[in-house]
Image (cartoon, rainbow, N blue to C red):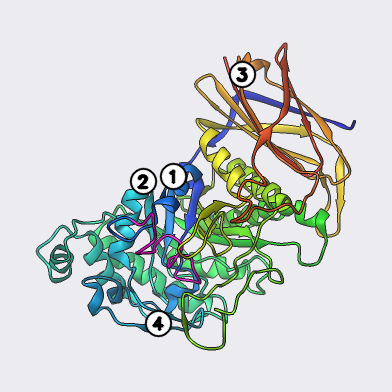
Amino acid sequence: MPSATITLDPAFTVAPVNRRTFGTFVEHMGRCVYTGIYEPGHATADEDGFRKDVLELTRELGVSVVRYPGGNFVSGYRWEDGVGPRPERPRRLDLAWHSVETNEFGLDEFARWCAKAGVEPMMAINLGTRGVQEALDLQEYANHPGGTALSDLREQHGASPYGITLWCLGNELDGPWQIGHKTAAEYGRVAAETARAMRMIEPGLELVACGSSSSRMPTFGSWEQTVLRETYDFVDYISCHAYYGNDDGDTASFLGSAVNMDRFIDAVTATADAVGAERKSSKKIDISFDEWNVWYGERSRRTDEDSDGWAVAPRRIEDEYNVTDAVVVGNLLISLLRHSDRVGVACLAQLANVIAPIMTERGGPAWRQPTFHPFAITSRLAAGQVLRVETDSPTVSTAKYGDITAVDAVATYDDGTLAVFLVNRSTEGPIEVTVDVGRAGVHTIAEALSIHDADGLATNSADHPDRVTPQAADAKLVDGRLTVSLPAVSWAAVSLTG
């Protein structure tokens, strides 16, 4: 059996584990909101119409922050449509997803849902068709304590200040598909004006400027540079968005997707630091990786709900994920964790039904997709400090990324508890991984879990919700050496204590 070795030491750290790494994304797209997190009349619905089965799964997933309401949707959104008495809310055409938006669920409902789910809201602002004044109006309604027209309106709607501190200044405005598409200079100017004005009300806000919608965009790099030259003094983060799939059947490259994520993060931080050096600034701009996931353009599930007409909450990109997808998601989380020194926020897109870890049916059950499990386990076990990890591994040849290590890993250490996250990106067979944990002072394996299957295409469904679940990993600890046997195309997590 091929072997790999991993060396780590709690004295050598990257950064603290950031709980915001485990964020997700709720967009008014398809069935993410309607029949996803919100379905009045469902057997589990609470007094607000929130599906309690989905709330429970959201807590189990370990979600820390949720970005809302988009996504492409936000670039044409009027936030005031989604507050106040529901019978008075207007129905609108949503140009982003060719749907009808009822606005039955809006800001007021989202804030209540976040409180029940125990997550932090991350609010996106429409800088596509709107601008500075509308952003300030939303901020006043959401956060101001009272005594003004919009804060008093919120109180009339029965709500205390929402206290939202994390805001996205638009979404993917580099994309020609975007409502209100802008050049980098146009966007950078309005983002800087908006950020400056918002800070006049609340200086302590955390603000995210739009980076490129993909590293494949022809303007990637130059977009970040231009935008940050305008916004550097007023924002805290620049966004990254990336989706990975295996539509072309290149499984080796698909399994190496985290290599692309690593390079993407490194390129954006280098660009941000170059702008900082230009400005002779000691400030660092971090990354909000607020859209990431596996997404199959050719394999997304659609039904006859989806048509050329304007429907309410039609099915959109409801990917059915398999074991291989779950392994890739687990590896992408490894990449995000090892960049914890610069990635301050990350959001798996999306939470329910739309390329999501949680699936539901109208009036029916909710279940976990295979991708649910590595996210939930990593969120639960990763704590303390992210450690620097040195890996010596066999390599895998890929068409997109060249030769890459078959084994990828990251570890965290928290007050005598070590968590090691591992992936075998090879399709050829198992690899035995030995981890020197002697310096961590751990003597007992508390938990060892793995995601793998002889059928890499195995999925979960409403009828078979537990076809793919975590299994016991083959792990042993002897004299300060942890040995883990990783099957081909597998992800594993091992927690050890003193």
The amino acid at mark 3 is Ala
Q: Residue at x 76, y 56 (%)?
A: 254
Residue assigned mark 3: 440
Alpha-carbon span between mark 4 and mark 1 = 35 Å
Q: Which element carries disc 2, helix, strand or loop? A: loop
Provide the residue span drawn in magenta.
Answer: 28-45
Image quadrant holding the C terminus, namely top right
The amino acid at mark 1 is Arg
Say if mark 1 contacts mark 2, CB within 8 Å. Answer: yes
Say if mark 3 contacts mark 4, CB within 8 Å. Answer: no
From where the camera sits, is residue 401 visible?
no
Alpha-carbon span between mark 2 and mark 3 = 32 Å
Give the image quarter of residue 134.
Answer: bottom left
Q: Which element carries disc 4, helix, strand or loop? A: loop
The amino acid at mark 2 is Gly
| Nearer to us in this view, 21 or 392 | 21
- Relative vertical location of residue 76 with respect to residue 368 in this rendering, above or below: below
Alpha-carbon span between mark 3 and mark 1 = 30 Å
Image quadrant holding the N terminus, namely top right
The amino acid at mark 4 is Thr
Is 11 situated left or right of 234 in this image? right
Say whether disc 2 or disc 3 marks the residue closer to the N-terminus. Answer: 2
Q: Which residue is situated farthest in the left direction here?
A: 147
Residue assigned mark 1: 59
Residue assigned mark 2: 118
Alpha-carbon span between mark 3 and mark 4 = 53 Å
Q: Residue at x 67, y 15 (%)?
A: 438
Say whether disc 3 or disc 1 marks the residue closer to the N-terminus. Answer: 1
Q: Which mark is residue 338?
A: none
Is 198 situated left or right of 252 in this image? left
- The magenta stretch spans residue 21: no
Is 354 situated left or right of 482 in this image? left
